[in-house]
Amino acid sequence: MNRFVVAETAVIDAPITRVWDVISRTDRYAEWVAGAIEVTDHHGVATVGKTYSERNRTLGPLKTDSVWTVREIEPFKRRVDTGTGFAPLQDVTNTFEFRPVHSADGREATEMLYQVEYTIGLGPLGLLLDSLQQPAMRAGMRTSMANLNTLLRSERSTTVR
């Protein structure tokens, strides 16, 4: 089996504490994760060893049910979850990493790394499938981080009033 790593990075226009508050809430994933249609079971704030479930979009019109287990939490720095339900992808590990930065105008912002590691079987067919799904996965990661940025900006504007 081949092991793949797909990663994208973006700057979120919010302090790391606000970003962490949202990404730590497993019940909020459908609000910003591009592939999540709905969170079907959750435990609220991410807790190591706990699971949450989602209904997801995969390639094209295909949908799947996934179950994620929180594996590692380093508050305000890193979160690692493993997931099932993404066949033919196996051994799926989702990692978010965060680093405080400043925007061009000096405001607090957060650099976010969104990374997915996985294996895929099926020999040459698996490699072909992966070459088709990787661009969509990267686009979904970029969209997710843009959605998170928009969500945090909209929440900031409602609390500023």
Image (spheres, helix red, strand yellow):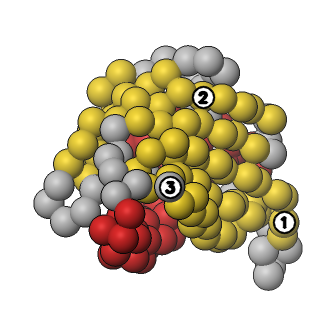
State the residue lying farthest toward the left.
Answer: 61
Task: Give the number of the mark in front: 2 or 1.
Answer: 2
Q: Position of residue 16 (x, y in %)?
A: 76, 50
Task: Give the number of the mark in front: 3 or 1.
Answer: 3
| Residue located beneath label 2 in the image | 70
Q: Is residue 129 left or right of residue 112?
A: left
Question: Quick check: 24 above or below 2?
Answer: above
Residue type, label 2: Val
Residue type, label 1: Val
Q: Considering depth in this image, is 86 or 34 the residue closer to the camera?
A: 86
Identified at 66% across, 29% down, the residue is 71
Q: Considering depth in this image, is 47 or 135 the residue closer to the camera?
A: 135
Q: Position of residue 156 (x, y in %)?
A: 59, 52
Identified at 82% across, 57% down, the residue is 99
Residue type, label 3: Met
Q: Position of residue 93 (x, y in %)?
A: 57, 45
Per the rendering, the mark at residue 101 is 1
CA separation in Å, label 3 and label 1 = 38 Å
N-terminal of the two: label 2 or label 3? 3
Question: Quick check: 70 above or below 31?
Answer: above
The answer to whether any part of residue 154 appears in the image is no
Q: Considering depth in this image, is 28 or 108 the residue closer to the camera?
A: 28
Q: Is residue 134 left or right of residue 38?
A: right
Per the rendering, the mark at residue 90 is none
N-terminal of the two: label 3 or label 1? 3
Identified at 60% across, 63% down, the residue is 5
